Amino acid sequence: MVTPADYLNTPAQTLEPHLEKLADLFRRMEQAYDAAAAEYGFQCEGCEDNCCLTLFFHHTLLEYLYLYQGYAQLPAEERRRLQQAAGQVNRSLAKAEKAGESIRVMCPLNEDDRCTLYPYRPMICRLHGIPHEIRRPGGQATRGVGCGDFDRQCGDRLYIPFDRTPLYLEMAAMEKKLREELNYKEKARLTVAQIIAGFPA
């Protein structure tokens, strides 16, 4: 079976246009998030509900390759450290799953409460934290809540519209174009730890 790792050696001239468009989308995501957060007066300063402890799954080849772009620029010693950390996270999660337990484990990219690959972090890491909405086909909106820290700071505030739909649709269109160009048809469902563990040291 073909995996995202099979595309790590794709020629730069093939990937760069796609990754540049993703970088631009990520900048606009952050601008939209920051604008909504500023209206609430919300500031993410770290808390016990740390989103780096949340088990997020990532589904796009585009984000996988973008994360690798940042990873590949790290010194070899730092890459080895991340490999070790990712392996430990994966073993802990596998052990808990086998035991039928639910645990929270720190993302291997988190070092001293800072993301090692912050400029390259996936989409959900950029948008998590404040209330939002997603509009399904037909226009029906599904509302998502803020994180625990948001509730503590701003839980009494009226909802400020933050529609993720256009951002998601643009991401989906970009992912479709990349997959068509590379002829990649498999589904992806990976944690950051699984992604990092699949990267070459």
Image: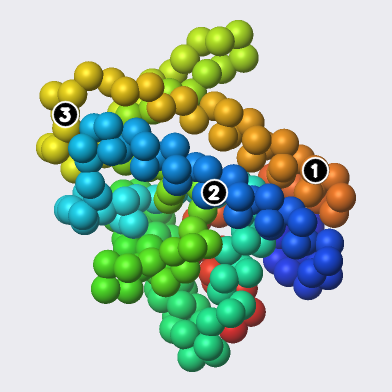
Give the structural element (helix, strand or loop) at label 2.
helix
What residue lies at 22% left-to-right and 19% top-to-bottom? 158
Q: Is residue 80 visible?
A: no
> Which residue occupies the foreground of this view, 22 or 112?
22
Q: Which mark is residue 14?
A: none
Judging by the rendered image, the residue that carries numbered circle 3 is 155
Q: Are marks 2 and 3 in contact (CB under 8 Å)?
A: no
**Crowd band around label 3 with a 10 angstrom C-alpha radius: few (<14), some (14–19), many (20+):** some
What residue lies at 13% left-to-right and 24% top-to-bottom? 156
Mark-to-mark CA distance, 1 and 3: 39 Å
Judging by the rendered image, the residue that carries numbered circle 2 is 26
Left or right position of 150 against 58? left
The amino acid on which the numbered mark 3 sits, given as a three-letter code, is Gly
Residue 98 in the image: x percent, y percent?
Answer: 41, 56
Q: Are marks 2 and 1 in contact (CB under 8 Å)?
A: no
Q: Are marks 1 and 3 in contact (CB under 8 Å)?
A: no
